[in-house]
Image (tube, grey):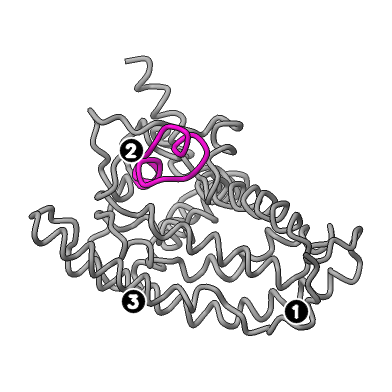
Amino acid sequence: MNLDFQAVPLDMEPVMYAVPFFVLLIAIELYVSYKGQHDLYEKGEALSSIGMGLGSLVINILMKALAFAGYSFLYQYRLFDLGWHWWVWILILFADDFTFYWHHRLSHEIRILWAAHVQHHSSQTLNLATALRQSWTELLYKYFWWFWLPLVGFHPLMILMMMSVSLIYQFWPHTELVGKLPRWYEFLFNTPSHHRVHHASNIRYLDRNHAGILMIWDRMFGTFAEEDLKEKPIYGITTNITSLNPLVIVSHEYKNIWIDFKRAKTVGDKIRYLFLPPGWSHDGTDQRAKTLRNNLNKA
């Protein structure tokens, strides 16, 4: 199959078509939670997550338009003319997911990036509304990570559409109602079980399972962790915030970085507070995830 991309409308946005299904699934999860007394939802957190989602939607309209313009410029210098063949969609699935994995992983391992991404992890409950708790500031730079795709030869519209497909897929793993799925599916794909691990603050689960759609990258690069049914995930971050105000959710880690930045005595330490993993300190206990995990394993 070979499609003329000029015939594809530029305002085509898969996420817009998915919104009614998001609302329906949240309503179903709410009902099941209520009837089964699962207590999956906390009203304030759910409302703040929805507020974050609405804010990110507005910001993303502008950023996606800028990304399309930037990708279109780079596309002029593409190495290959890949077109819109069916096999190109398979290629971009892997290319997009590989890019997402590294963007997501480094957003956990570089503190200035974590300050943006932590906004998504700040909820102490995990449910489908949590999936809407999207970072506002991450959108300001996120699209830079995908710059290499138009240079290879993927059309800008195809890139943005695949990013939206990935975002839609990542909605449903944010739930506690779905247990383990068949082993072949758990091996290949991101699932609720894998994503519960990702949102947990338990030491053994920290900075694990960064997958978007495919679980293969975590398995290949050593960041995979199986959900242990004997150790229930504790959601949130290692030092939780109590505010439900979206502005506080957006800014709290930047404020923490600024406090550490001011108390650092050398320029080198100031830079390290920006680029080393969260938990590093120039004068205190090392609270980085890998250090905590190593100490746990030695105990």
**Residue type beneath disc 1:** Ala
Front position in the image: 287 or 118: 118
Residue 96: x and y in percent read 66, 55
- Secondary structure under the numbered disc 2 in the rendered image: loop
Start-end of magenta stretch = 180-199
Nearest to N terminus: mark 2 or mark 1: 1
Q: Does the magenta stretch include residue 263?
A: no
Q: Name the residue under label 2.
A: 180
Question: Residue 69: which numbered mark, if any?
Answer: 1
Q: Nearer the viewer, mark 3 or mark 2?
A: 2
- Secondary structure under the numbered disc 3 in the rendered image: helix
Q: How far apart are marks 2 and 1 (CA)?
A: 41 Å
Q: Does the magenta stretch include residue 183?
A: yes
**Residue type beneath disc 3:** Gly
Residue 156 is at least partly visible in this image: yes
Residue 229: x and y in percent read 25, 31
Q: Quadrant of residue 129?
A: bottom left
